[in-house]
Image (cartoon, grey):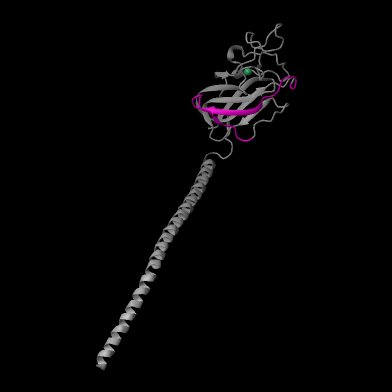
Amino acid sequence: MKKLSLMLAFVLVFALVLVACGDETETSSTPATESSVAATESTEESTEASTEASTEASVEESTEASTDESTEESTEASTDESTEAPVAGDENIAAGKSYTHSVLFRQGGADVGWGHDPNAPEAYPDEGEVTLTDGVIPADDALYSAVEWVGFNSNDPDYLGYHFITVDLGAKTDLAKFVFKYGTVALGQGISAPMTIEIYVSDDGETWSDAVAGDVPENDETTVNGVCELEAGASGQYVQFRFTSGGWAFISEVEVYGAAE
Ligand SMILES: [Ca+2]
């Protein structure tokens, strides 16, 4: 009997222990699950975050790497080919070539004084449309009325905001230098040197690339020749000289020099 009581007591204690553990398991199971979900979420978040971070980092790294590489490559390339401005050949390859230019000012006579008259002849015309590449250059002190000069006027109603002279070299050519010759007589009296100079090159005469490297000539009234070194690698069939003027600007010649062989 005593043995049976002991067994019952043991079973009872065991049962109580089981119930106690069951309660504990139940009460702790939910938070444990939540916390494990939370832990899973936070793992996902951290995975996303680390993925984003590593993606960003790798993008940055690869960008940096490619930038470094491309910088190195372009440096190497330009070093190999010609870091410095290309050396111009001696020959003016624009000599005798055809060209077009922006509109020339038509100046009236007695009726309109010095003003623009669309029916009047060009005031300082381009005789035969060959003046700018014919190799004929007037003396430095030649009056602006000399036929060797072509007059461009920024007061023309059709002024584009710049004048242009576009030379057709006849074939795509590697280019090194552009030169323009302008008049200096009576500068400041409604006449200026070419200003805001830009040189563009093109393969087809429609799509243009800026080709000026370094400093373009200053508006130096003592310099008759404007010399523009072109960017390394500049090439094209067409070369366009754009310039502004304060009133009149007189040009007698434009020259183009290819890159030396
Ligand atoms: Ca000329």
Q: Nearest the camera: 21 or 137?
A: 21
Q: Choose top left, top right, bottom left or bottom right for residue 120.
A: top right
Asked which quadrant contains residue 166, the reply is top right
Q: Residue furthest top?
A: 110
The residue sitting at 38% across, 66% down in the picture is 30
Q: Considering the whole magenta stretch, tell me its main secondary structure.
A: loop
Q: Is 51 situated above or below 213?
A: below
Q: Is residue 95 left or right of residue 35?
A: right
Foreground: 47 or 151?
47
**Rendered position, 35 above or below 236:** below
Give the image location of residue 64, x and y in percent: 51, 49
In the rendered image, the vertical position of residue 91 relative to residue 31, given as above or below: above
* Residue 66 vs residue 169, the one in the foreground: 66
Is residue 96 at least partly visible in the picture?
A: no
Query: Residue 232 location, x and y as percent?
Result: 55, 35
Quadrant assignment, res 244: top right
Confirm whether the magenta stretch covers residue 114.
no
In the image, the segment drawn in magenta is 187-214
Residue 48 drawn at (x, y percent): 43, 55
The spot of residue 151 in percent (x, y) is: 66, 17
